[in-house]
Image (cartoon, grey):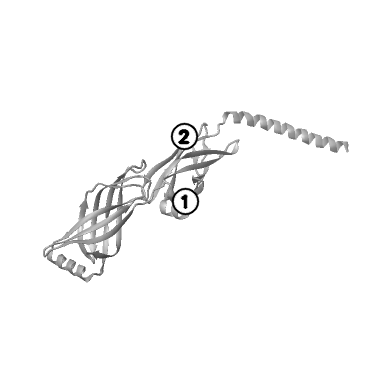
Amino acid sequence: MLKKKALVLFIFFLFLICQTGMAAIKNPIQSVFNKPDVSTDGLEITSLDFDSMEAMLNLKINNLNSISVDYPKITWTLKLGEILYKTGSLPDNGKIAPNKVEEIQIPISIAFKELYEKHPSLQRLDVVSYSVSADVNFKLPIFGKSNNSVVATGELPMLKKPVVNLDSILLKSMETDQVVFAVTASIQNKNGFDIHLERVDYSLIINNTKWATGNTRRQILVKPGQKSDIPLNIALRTSSMVSEAYALVLSEQDVRFDFKGTLFCKSTSPYLKSFELPFQLIGTKRIKL
């Protein structure tokens, strides 16, 4: 019985000695090995239009040691206001060289149409606060698993595409050698900033016949939440087009139109100083007398 107790005590003391010895070895190594430092330059908008926003989360991982470390696994989340919008991850493959700063770029894309369909409340905002958090998980010598977290915050614009319409086609004058129409298009601004329309390139096809192609330079201001007219005068002068126009007017029937072009605009938004807005409208319209 005494021998058994003595054996148990011997094993216990041997365990303590081993633990103390391992700690003595481990602590000096930990004191000279540094956990990699993780930082972020924040979220950078790389491209922006009324359809989508492309941004990049820039991370820097500084390996402060004279030995390489395994590449970390990175998971990230994007919140818009209180809405968790997106999550993603990057695989942990490769190694980070000794005493090197590794720069990692995480692309993040926002499609406005999809965003507003899922979260209609965001469509009422001109800007929204955001936070992007990144969890960087290492497998390190001696330390084992180690987690670093960084957060980038700021504001992002919530853009709404202006709506272009073809409102009316009005007969302005009819002569034997010329027919003139006043065509009124419009642009509706759904954003919280001014839009300054400076030029319109356009073409208008009526019942498969090209009535006009050209451009007009007009300084048109579209205030936030308002609609402004884009007046266009179109004159038909060839005999065939004049005859066709007479027949269309006298028939008092709807005509098929294909109205397309590009609006060239500037804005007071700090995110979108200038932009081009392509459009194409296809439908039917009654010519007004």
Q: How many marks?
A: 2
Q: Quadrant of the N terminus?
A: top right
Query: For the residue carrying disc 1, how many other residues have a C-alpha within 10 Å: few (<14), some (14-19), or many (20+)?
Result: few
- Whichever of callouts 1 and 2 sits on the residue coming sooner in the sequence is 2
Q: Amino acid at mark 2?
A: Val
Instruction: Determine whether the residue tagged by mark 2 lies in a helix, strand or loop.
Output: strand
Measuring from the top left, give residue 209's x and y in whole percent. 21, 65
Would residue 282 be found to the left or right of residue 93 on screen? left
Q: Which mark is residue 121?
A: 1
What label sits on residue 101 in the rendered view? 2
Based on the displayed image, in which of its 4 quarters is residue 140 positioned?
A: top right
Dot 2 crowding, Cα within 10 Å, few <14, some 14–19, many 20+: some
Seen as rendered, the residue at the extreme front is: 289
Q: From what the image shows, is residue 40 above or below residue 122?
A: above
Identify the residue at the far bottom of this view.
Answer: 251
The secondary element bearing badge 1 is classed as helix
Q: Nearer the viewer, mark 1 or mark 2?
A: 1
Q: Which quadrant would the C terminus be assigned to in this image?
A: bottom left
Foreground residue among 215 and 170: 170
> Disc 1 to disc 2, how far (Cα)?
41 Å
Of residues 183 and 92, which is closer to you in this image? 183
In the picture, the disc for residue 96 is none
* Rendered location of residue 114, percent (x, y): 43, 54
Q: Is residue 268 left or right of residue 151?
A: left
Farthest left residue in view: 177
